Each structure stands twice: as C-alpha cells, then as structure tokens.
Amino acid sequence: MSQPTLDQIWAALPERIRQNKGVMQRIQTAPPRLAAAIYKDMFWITDPEGRGMVRSIPDDELLPLMLALYSHQGGTDPQAEAEFWKGVWAQ
C-alpha cells in the first residue's frame, strides 16, 4: 500500500476541522511529531453511547495517516514514530 498523499490526509479530517483555518495552519506548520499529535486529536468525538470521548476512526486507519503526515512534514524515522504511537495507545 502506498503512503497517503497530503490531499488524502486532509480529506480524512472532519469537515469542521478542514474549515478551521487556524487549526489547519497549526497542523501544517508544526514539527513532524507535533503535527501528527495535533492531527490525531482532531478525530475525537462524543461517544454516541454516552461513555465519554472516542476517536471517529479506528487506530489502524488513523496511524497510517499520522505517519504519512509525519513524513510529509519532514519526519525521518516513520518506523520509530509508529512504535512511539503504538506505545502511547497501549498505555
């Protein structure tokens, strides 16, 4: 599978985020890991079952988008980045 393009990365974001120029600029100008972290946080939604907050897409769909953004932002070690996020999510 090929790496998602920037257009695909941005298209995956919820519409309300894509329309927020301040948030988009913050993601686009952040260093690689911070950009991935900010991007990740844009997918939190209120759980429809009323149990707090959940991500709107599963980790296995979100991580490739985050890693592609990391790389597009100049990140040089996507494997280490993937391990970092897997470790964060395992806690």
Image (cartoon, rainbow, N blue to C red):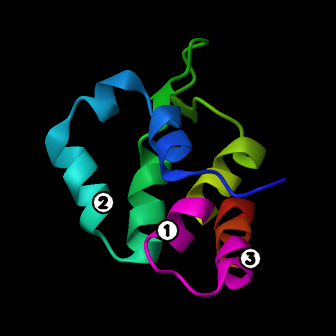
Badge 3 or badge 1: first in the primary sequence: 1
Q: Which residues are magenta?
A: 68-82
Q: Which residue is mark 3?
A: 83
Q: Amino acid at mark 3?
A: Glu
**Residue 77 percent across, percent down from the top left:** 64, 86
Residue mark closest to the camera, 3 vs 1: 1
Residue mark closest to the camera, 2 vs 3: 2
Q: Which residue is mark 1?
A: 72
How crowded pointer 2 is (Cα within 10 Å; few <14, some 14-19, many 20+) is rated as some
Q: Residue at x 71, y 46 (%)?
A: 59
Q: Amino acid at mark 2?
A: Gln
Q: Which residue is mark 2?
A: 28
**Residue 86 percent across, percent down from the top left:** 73, 67
Question: At numbered mark 3, what does the secondary structure look like: helix, strand or loop?
Answer: helix
Badge 2 or badge 1: first in the primary sequence: 2
For the C terminus, the image quarter is bottom right
The front one of 46 and 17 is 17
Rounded to the nearest angstrom, the CA distance separating label 2 from label 3 is 23 Å
How crowded pointer 3 is (Cα within 10 Å; few <14, some 14-19, many 20+) is rated as few
Tell me which corner region of the image, top left, top right, bottom left or bottom right, holds residue 73: bottom left
Question: At numbered mark 2, what does the secondary structure look like: helix, strand or loop?
Answer: helix
The front one of 22 and 6 is 6
Q: Residue at x 57, y 51 (%)?
A: 5
* Helix, strand or loop: magenta stretch: helix
On whether residue 79 falls in the magenta region, the answer is yes
Q: Is residue 53 above or below residue 24?
A: above
**Residue 46 percent across, percent down from the top left:** 47, 23
Q: Is residue 60 above or below residue 18?
A: below
On whether residue 89 falls in the magenta region, the answer is no
